[in-house]
């Protein structure tokens, strides 16, 4: 499997505060990697650095082999993202937002791509609705449709199902799993829903205080550390990271 | 630079304008009110002043030129503020869009929106108040060009200030034209000003335009060099403010401001 994302010795500090401390990891094509950790562990900081909206203090990020620091625009052409805290402008319609972001990502045959996504994400009846009047679940679907516009090689998802009811979340998870299985792209996914992570992720990285504490298959990792479930492991990481570091 | 990305920034403004009368009206309403107000003031002054002196090209023409510059500035800042108001920085700056492309999109949006205001002002000034642009002759082109460049530079400066200081700094931006107008000599010769104000006026490209305009109306010989100096200053400010915007953006990326741009976190 080829690497779509390669992060090496990534570090971000704000004065004396270290938010991310020497992270190194890869995401391969067709792979869904879960980035887990308690609040403040450095997940969103890491995603922001990969998105090019936060400059690392040191380290390198390569997307499809392109160095983000040296060729920002070219590297970002291969990415896209959806985050619960980054809704699309509410004063534009669904279709208008998709057209504008499609142009920004240089999507070929944009009109057809928009139609495909409206159909795939069940947004056809909302095409002329302003995004600001949609429910949070509908807005999440629009954000995901935006994230798929350029069929990214690297899809970054920061708690994409956080505002969805379980039924909608299942649908969204299925779409993302399909994307990873049937495209050449890879996915980096953060979530606090351990059931979801166990279901969709091929590999997880547990972050604590800006460092990777544990890494492995979410189905076998809890047992390897004497825990019954991923949720239990998560709580242990959040409460006693030093104890886990020693195991 | 990729034209499709610049077009995306412009298209966003077009979509917003098309769907919102509240955005279309200000493109021409305030400048139209200014034209009507100063048109009647000019007419009144014509009726009480000595015969032979026409206040219409002097006052109404000056207001038209000044309002044009203000509309150009606001065209840039308003397009930028749309991203501030919708908290859209994370979405757009995580795309391949570069800063030169983004700023180019803002400038093209401003050309489109300020043109609407200019056309309305010209129509009102000529049809209702009899302002003849022939009186300015070919000099109207460099006058508008210098004010256009200055308006763009001020718009980029305003955007850089808000990007650096946060959404609340928007209220520093609206009064900028009013703060500059006494120094620009829109309605009076610079010789009216005290020395310290004249010194500041010499740093403003607009002051050379309005001095030139008065010289043309009074049929005095218009020296090319002061207006050329004004044009050079406008180009210099445009380059300076573009550089400043780039610096502020890099600072915002270094500190994480772009990723969490709200009134609470900026500053």
Image (cartoon, coloured by chain):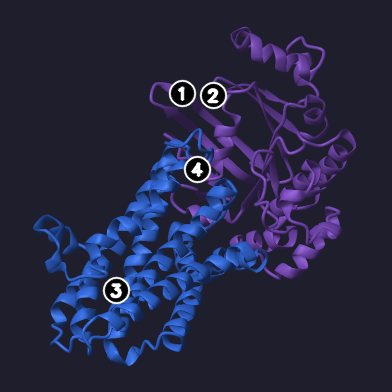
Report the Cα–Cα distance between label 4 and label 2.
20 Å
Which image quarter: residue B77?
bottom left
Residue B224: % across, % down: 16, 82
Q: Label 3's element?
A: helix
Q: Which residue is mark 2?
A: A210
- 4 and 2 marks in contact (CB < 8 Å): no
Q: Which chain is purple?
A: A
The answer to whether A71 is drawn above or below residue B65 in the figure is above
Residue drawn 71% across and 14% down? A235
Relative to A224, does residue A194 appear above or below in the rendering?
below
Q: Are marks 4 and 3 on the same chain?
A: yes
**Residue drawn at (49%, 52%), measured in percent from left and top?**
A72
Between circles 1 and 3, the one closer to the viewer is: 3
Q: Position of residue B58 (x, y in %)?
A: 27, 79
Name the chain letter of the residue that bears numbered label 2: A
Label 1 belongs to which residue? A18
Q: Quadrant of the C terminus of chain A?
A: top right
């Amino acid at each position: 499997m080829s690497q779509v994302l390669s992060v090496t010795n990534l570090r971000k500090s704000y004065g004396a505060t270290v938010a991310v401390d020497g992270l190194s990891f890869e995401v391969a094509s067709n792979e869904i990697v879960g980035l887990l950790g308690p609040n403040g562990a450095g997940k969103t900081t890491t995603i922001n650095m990969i998105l090019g909206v936060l400059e690392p203090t040191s380290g390198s990020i390569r997307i499809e082999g392109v160095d983000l620091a040296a060729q920002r625009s070219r590297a970002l052409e291969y990415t896209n993202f959806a985050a619960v805290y980054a809704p699309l402008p509410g004063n534009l319609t669904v279709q208008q937002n998709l057209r504008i972001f499609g142009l920004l990502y240089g999507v070929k045959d944009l009109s057809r791509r928009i139609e495909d996504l409206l159909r795939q994400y069940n947004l056809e009846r909302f095409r002329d609705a302003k995004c600001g009047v949609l429910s949070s679940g509908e807005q999440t679907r629009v954000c995901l449709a935006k994230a798929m516009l350029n069929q990214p090689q690297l899809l970054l998802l920061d708690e994409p199902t956080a505002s969805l009811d379980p039924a909608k979340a299942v649908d969204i998870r299925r779409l993302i799993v399909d994307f990873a299985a049937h495209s050449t792209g890879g996915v980096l996914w953060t979530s606090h829903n351990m059931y979801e992570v166990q279901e969709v992720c091929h590999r997880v990285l547990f972050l604590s205080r800006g460092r990777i504490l544990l890494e492995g298959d979410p189905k076998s990792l809890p047992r390897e550390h004497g825990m019954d479930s991923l949720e239990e492991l998560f709580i242990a990481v959040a409460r006693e990271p030093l104890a886990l570091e020693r195991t | 630079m990729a034209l499709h990305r610049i077009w995306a920034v412009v298209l966003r403004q077009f979509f917003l304008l098309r769907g919102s009368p509240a955005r279309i009206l200000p493109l021409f309403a305030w400048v139209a009110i200014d034209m009507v107000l100063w048109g009647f003031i000019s007419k009144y002054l014509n009726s009480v002043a000595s015969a032979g002196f026409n206040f219409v090209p002097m006052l109404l023409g000056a207001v038209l030129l000044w309002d044009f510059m203000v509309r150009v500035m606001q065209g840039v800042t308003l397009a930028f503020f749309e991203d501030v108001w919708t908290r859209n920085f994370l979405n757009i700056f995580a795309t391949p869009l570069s800063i030169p492309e983004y700023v180019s999109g803002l400038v093209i949006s401003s050309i489109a929106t300020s043109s609407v205001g200019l056309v309305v002002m010209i129509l009102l000034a000529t049809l209702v108040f009899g302002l003849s642009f022939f009186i300015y002759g070919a000099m109207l082109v460099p006058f508008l060009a210098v004010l256009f460049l200055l308006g763009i530079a001020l718009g980029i400066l305003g955007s850089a200030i808000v990007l650096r200081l946060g959404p609340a700094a928007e209220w520093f931006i609206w009064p900028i034209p009013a703060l500059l107008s006494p120094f620009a000599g829109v309605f009076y010769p610079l010789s009216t000003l005290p020395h310290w104000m004249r010194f500041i006026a010499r740093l403003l490209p607009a002051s050379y335009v309005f001095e030139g305009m008065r010289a043309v109306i009074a049929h005095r010989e218009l020296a090319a060099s002061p207006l050329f100096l004004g044009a050079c200053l406008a180009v210099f400010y445009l380059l300076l403010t573009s550089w400043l915007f780039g610096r502020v953006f890099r600072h915002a990326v270094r500190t994480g401001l772009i990723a969490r741009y709200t009134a609470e976190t900026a500053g």
